[in-house]
Every structure is written in C-alpha cells, then in structure tokens.
Amino acid sequence: MMLTHALALAVASLPILAAATPVELEARQSCSTGEIQCCESTETAGSATGTALLGLLGVVVQDLNVLLGVNCSPITVIGVGSSGSCSASTVCCDDNSHGGLVSIGCVPVSL
C-alpha cells in the first residue's frame, strides 16, 4: 500500500519536474556570441537583398552562403512570458554590430 502511494506521487510529480523553469529557459536562450536575436527575416549574403544591404553598409563577407539576419533586435528574458518571444526568425549571430539592420553569421535557434 505504501509503495503504491509513493509510486503515485512520483508519477504525479513528473509534469512538474519536466516544466521549464526561468533558469532553464535562460540557459536555452543563451548564445555564445551575445543575445539571441529576433529578426524580421533572414537572407544569404549572396542573395539580392543580402548583397544590397551589405553593399550599403560597406561590409564585405568571404562566404556568400553565410546567413544574415535583417532588422534584428535582442530577445531578453526578464521572466517567463511575452518578453522572451519572437514571431519572426530567432537566430544567434557572430556579428551584431550593425545597429540591428543586419546581423552576420547567423544560425537559426529554436526556443
């Protein structure tokens, strides 16, 4: 009887243990090059849009297949909720130094 209660308690606790805590969410949203970015779109450097944007900024990239984030802003986690959401493309980029217009060397991130 006691074993049955202990087993029932353990099974009932599983969903609680599996739920993401704010610390776990923050860990998943970490990016080795800075904050995860929310970008309106992504383009390759060799695409017409990518080439035009890089040309306007005077930026030269070696690999035309590198992914660019366009019109990006950082996603911050102040708590669980809408502050950490993005309805467009979430990416981690190597170079976010162009004022959010273009981020270079991006990799898609799943939140």
Image (cartoon, rainbow, N blue to C red):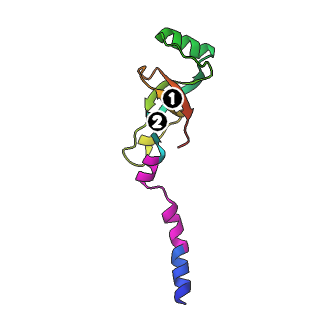
User: Horizontal and vertical percent for residue 75?
Assistant: 43, 36
Residue 36 is labelled as 2
Q: Does the magenta stretch include residue 13?
A: yes
Residue receiving disc 1: 39
Amino acid type at image mark 2: Ile
Q: Which of marks 1 and 2 is in front?
A: 2
User: Horizontal and vertical percent for residue 36?
Assistant: 46, 36
Amino acid type at image mark 1: Cys
Q: What stretch is highlighted in magenta?
A: 11-27
Query: Is the residue marked by circle 2 packed among few (<14), some (14-19), or many (20+) residues within 10 Å?
Result: many
- Element marked by disc 1: strand
Location of the N terminus by quadrant is bottom right
> Please, which residue is most extreme toward the front here?
62
Query: Is the residue marked by circle 1 packed among few (<14), some (14-19), or many (20+) residues within 10 Å?
Result: many
- Label 1, label 2: how far apart the Cα atoms are: 10 Å
User: Horizontal and vertical percent for residue 67?
Assistant: 58, 25
Between 21 and 59, the one lying in front of the other is: 59
Residue sitting at x 41%, y 52%: 23
User: Horizontal and vertical percent for residue 8?
Assistant: 55, 78
Residue 29 in the image: above or below residue 57: below
Q: Do the residues labelled 1 and 2 touch (CB within 8 Å)?
A: no
